[in-house]
Structure formats: structure tokens, C-alpha cells
Image: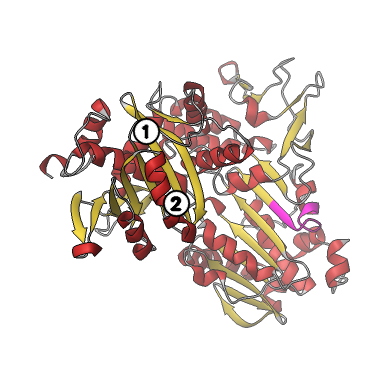
Amino acid sequence: MLLKDLVGQSQNGLSFPEYCLKHIVLDDRTPYNVFNRAYMKEIVEAIFTHPHITITKGAQTGQSTLFLSHSFYMVDIHGANVIYYLPTDKMAVRFGQTRIDPYVERSEYLRSRMLGTDQAGLKQIGTHFFYMLGLMSKTGAISIPADEVLFDEVALINRENMDLAQDRILASKLGWQRYFSTPIYEEDGIDELYRESDMNKWVVTCEGCGRESIPEEEFPDNMRDDRAKGGKVYLACLKCGAALNVDNGRWIAEHPERINQRGYRVPQLAIREARLDLIWDRWLKAQGKPEKIARVRRSALSIADSGNMQPISSKVLEIVEAAGDYYFQDRSDIQCAMGIDMGDRAHVAVSAPWGDGFKVIAAFHIDVEDLLPLIPDWEIAYNLSALVIDAMPYKTESKRVVRALRRATGYIQYFKPNYKETTEGEDEKEVRVIQIDRDESLDEMTSYFGTNPPQALLFKPRDTKEEKTLDEVKRHLKKLVKEEIVGPDGQKKISYKRNTENHFGMAINSALIALMLRNHGGSISPENILTAGKRKIAQLLRGYDDA
């Protein structure tokens, strides 16, 4: 009833399923039946009744077609303005040309409804608009008001720009948000949004014994391959062995109390006609190859798995937590190092040497304007020997922090390909500068957490406040994820993702660099702080042996 209450009765009385059957023609020239898969019924109902929908999906599960058709319906029948976001402008234009335009061309009705502007990234139906925009920059996130925003390929969209784009619906009575994507990174992108929702899962009931199961969570134990006996590959009940009918299922929310955010996980295994033989063959061939296993888990199971592209995962942090046996520290008798990631808020990590590695003994996140007065107290309390702070985006404030140190040696930090130590400014304004390769330093830092047993530890919280801080630290460490980019030389390379909420991870990285610098010598008394760890870092840093 929500839609009718807000925008009135549809112009021609067609329901959305009727509209799709009558006016949406698929690539194979058949009418679009939104209920051709059992799991779709509740999702279709939800997108017309619930303001916030998240769908983490396997490949080819029909969500893009559903939301594209939904967008036509909303603009055409209900006079809404809709924005369909994709990660980049190039993807948005290509989507318009290869997906939207063919739907219009195949439907005499849709062709007749197009008015005025008819571009790949903009369709006008009547007096309302259907936009296709990229979110690589903030430009696509501003200026255009809308009643509904849809985000496709969320796993690849810049989160900050996506948050800005949500402002487009503030003036609308509807104000609907829809997010859908195949997951990549654990607790990042679409997986993070799904975990914040009520987390509906498709639960299948065995027609043989009545046992309920979630197929993707029992994969691969529930797969049976009878092809050698003239049979087929099928999903089996783990209790009685009967073949599962995935249409005999229902959505069950893991967190029904989260009424403000509806979420669904849609794996390929929930599709009755899914090619289970191909999925199974891909899985068998992927064994021993983490990246290929990750692709199958993402596309077939709709489970976030980045392979080697997310060095610090939940499993890694479970091992780290089990190895740690110390609490958040307010002070330290041994010399420590501090790393600070600068932004709208400053994220601070204090690290102490530990064996061949290090341990994080304290972490803070504070307003930038409150940072400077705390430096003298922290320097004494944590017996700081070195501090490394981002030069950007607040270089003036970062320099003030370095100059506020009385005993410790401070550096402002730039991420550049070649390792270098230098200075900026003159006389009393002079500060030390460290420039270092971002990807290589992060590879080194994350490797300390990733070894088993770990060579990096995290503190245990003493109270609720510290528990929240620790949760944020772990969340930011998991967001130190990699992606494939094209470098300045035009060559593809794997690099740590930028513009993501990994601030504590970057602060811990700076604290580790500060430990290395403390051991480097110079004006600091040489003590063996990182032992073998120091040598490991030194080998990593370009030019270190020659510095």
C-alpha cells in the first residue's frame, strides 16, 4: 500500500508483473515473467513496499533485469524520477547502450513512451526521467533529485560517493534505496550492507524428510555427481540423501529485528535450472587455486571471497585474537611508536615491539582539532621513540604534530614509489619526511597479521568504549583490500584500494614504519627493537640498504 499512498494509482492499472509480461521483452524474445523463479516472489513484493533493499547475488540470478524493469515501471507508470548508478561513467554508458536500449527497441510500447532526450545515459518518459550515472567521482552523486536510487555492482562503487548519492532522495516522499551486486570483499561493499540488514536466506525444505537447509552454506558437502552412472549433478539433503527441490523454499531472516533494512542473499544454487554440472566442474578444477575458488564462491554461492585480495580476513583476525593476551594500555615502560592517519578525524595507533613483530597496545579516533594538545601527553605516557603521520590532507596540522614532539623523532609521510628520507621547511619549521611505497608497506604490515602464528597482535578491550574501538580497528583492517588497476604506464597492476574506510589499518601501517625508523638510527639511540622483523622490513623498503 505504501506506493499507492504516496504516488497514487497507476495510470493504466497494470501491476508490475503484468507490465513486465506485456512490455518487457528479454534477449531470447520471450516476455519477462518476474515470478519464473520461486525466490523472486518476496523480493518483487519487497521492492514495492520497503524503502531500503540490499541484495547480495550470484552471477546471472536476474537482479539487474528485475531492477531495470522496475525502473521503467516506476518512471512510466508512477511518474517517479529514478537514478541507476554503476561504478563508472563508462560502465553507465555501456549499460545504457547494451542493456537499456535493446529493451526499448524490442518493445513497441516503450519506444512510443520515449520523449525528448533519448541518450544512452538518460531516458525521458512523459515528464520524468530515468538516469544512468557512474560514481567514479562525486559528480554523479550531486545535483539531480530523485525518488529512488539504485546501485548496481556495489562491490566496485566508491562508498563515499555512494553515501553522497543517497542525498538525491532526501526531498522525495518515497526516498527508496536499492543495492545489489555480486560480493567480493568480506564485510565491505555489498557484503557489508547485507550484514547490516535483516539478512534473509533462502531455506530449502527436503521433500523426503522435511529437513531444512541453506544450500550455499552446505556446499560442497551437499553436491552429488551421478554422471558416471548415467545420472546428473544435483543438490542432496545431508540427512536422507534425497535430491533437493530448491523451489520448495522460503526466505528466513537471520535478524528479523532489523526492520529498517531488508536484505536477501541470492545464490545460483537457488535457481531450479542452474547448471550444477558446470558449477561442480569449476569447483573441482579450482582446488588448490585460491583465486579460482573465490570466484566460484562469489558467483555460485553469493558469498564474499576475494581470494588473496583481502590479506586480513575474519579468519585471520580470529587467530590474532586467540594469540593475544594483553589489554588496552594507557602507558608503556618500553619504547613505542605511533602512527596517525589523517582525515576529517585522526585515527591513531600505538605499537610496541613484540618478538620478531609488533603489537598494537592502544588506538584512538578523535577530531583533528583535538589532536595537537594530546601529543605531549601521549609522547610521555607511551614512551614514544618515533611518530609517523600522513602529510595529507592537512599538511600544516601534520607538521605541527611533528614539531610538538620533545624527545621522539617525528616524520610526515608521503606514499611514493621510491623509499626516501628527507626534510621540508627551514630552521624551526623544518620537519623530517619519509616517503615510501604504499602497496609494498601494506603488504609487509598485513603479512605480520597473516602468518600463523601471527607476528602482530591486537589489544583486548577493558570496557565498552574500547570494545567499540577494537571492532572499528578490525573492520578497518579487513578493508585493506586489493584491486586491479591500470598504472601510469598503462600496465595493469594489483594495488590496495583507495578511498575506503581503512583508517586504523593505515595508522597501524604508519606505526610499523615508525618502529622501523626508530631502529634505523640517526638521532635515535640504536636499540634492537624489531630484531628479525627489522631486517624483514628493511628488505622490503626500496633503497633502505642504500639510504
Residue at position x 84%, y 74% from top?
A: 11
Locate residue 372, reporting x and y percent.
42, 57
Element under disc 1: strand
Mark in the foreground, 2 or 1: 2
Asked whether residue 125 appears in the rendered view, the answer is yes
Which type of secondary structure does the marked residue at label 2 adopt? helix
Which of 203/166 is in front?
166
Point out the stretch of residues depicted in magenta.
Answer: 45-53
Residue that label 1 marks: 352
Q: Which mark is residue 374?
A: 2
Q: Position of residue 529 (x, y in %)?
A: 27, 30
Figure quadrant of residue 198: top right
Image location (x, y in percent) of residue 314:
53, 32
Give the color scheme: rainbow, by chain, secondary structure or one colour.
secondary structure
Q: Residue 77: which numbered mark, if any? A: none
Cα distance in 3D space between marks 2 and 1: 19 Å
